[in-house]
Image (cartoon, grey):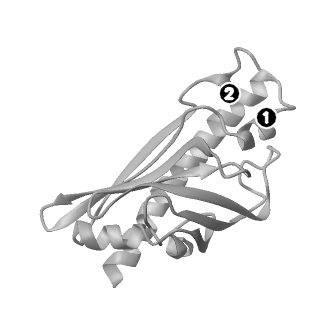
Amino acid sequence: MANSIIEKSPLFELRADKRVSASPEKVYAVVSDLPRQAEWSPECRGGEWISGEPSAVGSIFRGENLRSEDVVSWAPLIRGTWYTEARIVAAEPGRTFQWVMLTHAQEDQESLWGFDVAADGDGTVLTHHFRMGKATAGIHKIVKDMDEQERAQFVTDWTAKLAQDLDETLDRIKVVIEKQ
């Protein structure tokens, strides 16, 4: 894959913002409770803490995910139910909560997800961000039989999917928090 778009770094880097009518501490308490992801994530149906204290740096979360057939339907993605593991790398109440996706051997990958919260008057600006530096093992598996044009199309389509997921996640979190 030398000189492939898949070797670009960062491969993906996206962020989205949404104002929420709640304190940064309240917003942080919700977004750092990863088992609650089923309430707002387009794909994660929840999960459980498998090591460490819930929401603490170094702890590992095993997520249960569900992906439909229509998500980038032409690409050889995992469909149906599948599992991921992530390690918490930042947990600063009222400020930031971040996790990296792990390999099957529980090694960190350059796949960082997170939420940042910032006071904004009587509310909070919630930022959801994702950065993939080097392509993960999963991305390499997806594109291994693609030619370069198909790889470029996959990156374009996956970027659009990720952007939609970030926006949808923030919209759902806002509803969850503001209806409490």
- In percent of the image, x 69 and y 48: which residue is there? 103
How many numbered marks have been drawn onto this rendered protein structure?
2
Q: Percent from the top left, x then y, of residue 146?
A: 83, 30
Residue type, label 1: Val
- In percent of the image, x 67 and y 39: which residue is there? 136
Instruction: Examine the rendered structure and indicate whether residue 131 appears above or below residue 6.
Output: below
Instruction: Examine the rendered structure and indicate whether residue 113 appears above or below residue 47.
Output: above
Instruction: Examine the rendered structure and indicate whether residue 115 appears above or below residue 108.
Output: below
The answer to which quarter of the image holds residue 92 is bottom left
What residue would you read off at disc 1? 143
Work out how far the residue at label 1 is from the one at label 2, CA to CA, in angstroms. 8 Å
**Secondary structure found at label 2:** helix
Residue 50 or residue 76, whichever sits in front: 50
The answer to which quarter of the image holds residue 156 is top right
Residue 58 or residue 133, whichever sits in front: 58
- In percent of the image, x 40 and y 49: which residue is there? 16
Residue type, label 2: Ile
CB atoms of marks 1 and 2 within 8 Å: yes
Q: Percent from the top left, x then y, of residue 45?
A: 63, 72
- In percent of the image, x 83 and y 46: which residue is there? 76
Residue 180: assigned label: none
Say left or right for 106 vs 97.
right
Q: Dot 1 surroundings within 10 Å: few (below 14), some, or many (20 or more)? A: many
What residue would you read off at disc 2? 6
Residue 72 in view here: yes
Residue 169 or residue 89, whichever sits in front: 89
Say left or right for 58 vs 104.
left
**Secondary structure found at label 1:** helix
Tag 2 or tag 1, which sits nearer the N-term? 2
Residue 156 or residue 92, whichever sits in front: 92
Considering every residue shown, the one lying at the far top of the view is 3
